[in-house]
Each structure stands twice: as structure tokens, then as C-alpha cells.
Amino acid sequence: MTNPKGSFLWYELMTSDPDAAARFYGAVVGWTIAPNAGTAASGVDYRMIGRSDGGNAGGVLGLNADMLAGGARPAWMGYLYTPDVDATIAAITADGGAVHMPPTDLPVGRIAMLSDPQGAPFYVMNPIPPAGMEDVDSDAFSPTEAQHVRWNELMTSDPDAAIAFYRKHFGWGQEGAFDMGEMGPYRFVQVGEVAIGAVMGLVPGAPAATWSYYIGVDDIDRAAAAITANGGTITCEAAEIPGGEFAMNGLDPQGAAFGLVGPRH
């Protein structure tokens, strides 16, 4: 794998109803999420999100009763690549971040859940590529393609500190911004030469710092209609963004927030 440090390698939907999530995102995005193949071995209901091109967009983690009792709630999470999970944790905690799930070794790699100093949660991961695929990059993120996450947006109480944090620990760049008036600048961030998303201040009423992930769709109006037709909620109607495409936000039927981005036909 040749993805640079700080890349978004994977996305995970934590949900209380994986079967319902499969129906919803199948209708809205076009993904295929397989039925539960059985949880006897691990005790965990984990399913891959399949794209139409045969690749994987991420995974779905079924939240069991213990997880829900412990405070877990439906949400989307992103995984950032680091070649050394333990060193990254040590540096981040020394810099004011927090550990929510300690380093754990899985067949797919070593992972941990952290939050930045402003409280936005994310995973870090050093993956173990499948045999024979050591040189294959993760393509869960694509800045241009439908059925991939196309944009990663951090809303935070301290954008300056957040940008400095991700620059220091993950090597991100920050070039360019969009003026949002009273809401302040919408500042673009990059991994290498690739624009991966943006950092902005908290909007009025937002309770905490959080990451939002914008999934690519083939037609924003078709996808918006599918949200409401399949039990979801539109929280921010489609609006044109620089470049001529459209972005919007919603909640799936289980309450996980997500974004969509795509053209209008």
C-alpha cells in the first residue's frame, strides 16, 4: 500500500439496524451491503459496503445491546492511516487528544479510536493488506467518483488549532478557503496534492466538534428523493458548491448523519 500517512483509508457506519441501513443506502447511494453472514466467530456483526465497480466503500458495524448500553450511537466514522498506531497515540495524547478505544489488533490491521483536542472522534489504522495485494491502495475515498466518500468535513470549536493538530500528526496541508461570511472561512485541507476536505467553525446550535463525510452520488435530486422515500431526513437541502455540483446533508433512519455530493441532471 502506498497511500500517504494521513489518508482516509476506510469509512464505517455504526448502526443499530444493519439490514435497514442496507436498504436505505442501497436506495440512496447504490451500494450493496450483504446480509449478516453470522457473528458466532467474533460476536460482531460486521458487513462490507460494496460498490457497483466491485470495490468496497467501507463497512457496517452492527451496534449490539452492550455497545448501545455503553453509549454508542449510530454514526459514520473515518479511519486515518498511520504506519505506527502506538506512536501516533502517544503523540496525540501528549498533545491534548484522547483515546476512546485502545490499540487493537484485527486480521485487517491495528486500529484505535481517538479524538482530537476539540473532541472530534476518528480512528487510526495501520492496515494489513490481503496477500498478493500489498501494493494496492485504498480507494474508499475519491475526490471525484460516485459511491465513494468524496469529501471529509471537520466542524470544530477551534479551526486554527485543529488544522495545526492534523498538520502536525498526519502531515496535512492547508491551502485555500471559501468565505462563509459571519460563519468564517471554510478552509481546504490536503494530503499531498489531493484536496480531501475542509475545516470550519461550529455552526450555531452544533453541540460538539464532529467529522462529516460526503458520499458521492450520481444525481443529487434522485438521491434526495430517495432519502425521504426511504425513511431518512434531509437536514440541509442541496446547495450548489464551487465547481457546479451540489451538496446536502441528512440523517438515515437510525439517526446517523451523512452528507451527499454530486451533479444535478
Image (cartoon, helix red, strand yellow):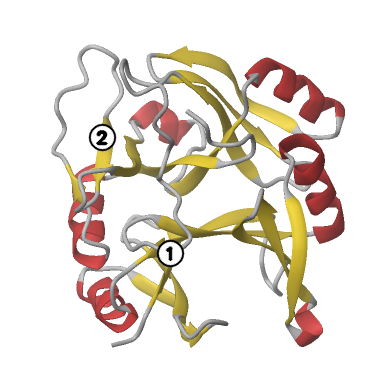
Element class at badge 2: strand
Where residue 176 appears, as percent x and y from the top left, is 75, 70
Please give the name of the residue rendered at 37% of the width and 55% of the height, measured from the top-left corner. Answer: 148
Quarter of the view holding residue 218: bottom left
Is residue 141 positioned above or below 159 on the image? above
Q: Which residue is mark 1?
A: 144
**Whether residue 158 is visible:** no
On-image quarter of the C terminus? bottom left
Please give the name of the residue rendered at 50% of the width and 86% of the height, measured from the top-left corner. Answer: 240
Label located before the other in sequence (1 or 2): 2
Please give the name of the residue rendered at 75% of the width and 52% of the height, measured from the top-left corner. Answer: 173
Please give the name of the residue rendered at 25% of the width and 35% of the height, measured from the top-left corner. Answer: 47
> Is residue 43 rendered to the left or right of residue 134?
left
Where residue 207 appears, as percent x and y from the top left, is 67, 60
Is residue 233 positioned above or below 241 on the image? above
Q: Which residue is mark 2?
A: 47
Element class at badge 1: loop
Quarter of the view holding residue 132: top left
- Which is more toward the observer, 43 or 113? 113
> Is residue 249 rendered to the left or right of residue 265?
right
Amino acid type shown at disc 1: Thr
Quarter of the view holding residue 255: bottom left
Where residue 120 appears, as percent x and y from the top left, is 67, 47
Q: CA distance from mark 1 to mark 2?
A: 25 Å
- Which is more toward the observer, 105 or 6? 6
Where residue 85 appears, as percent x and y from the top left, is 64, 20
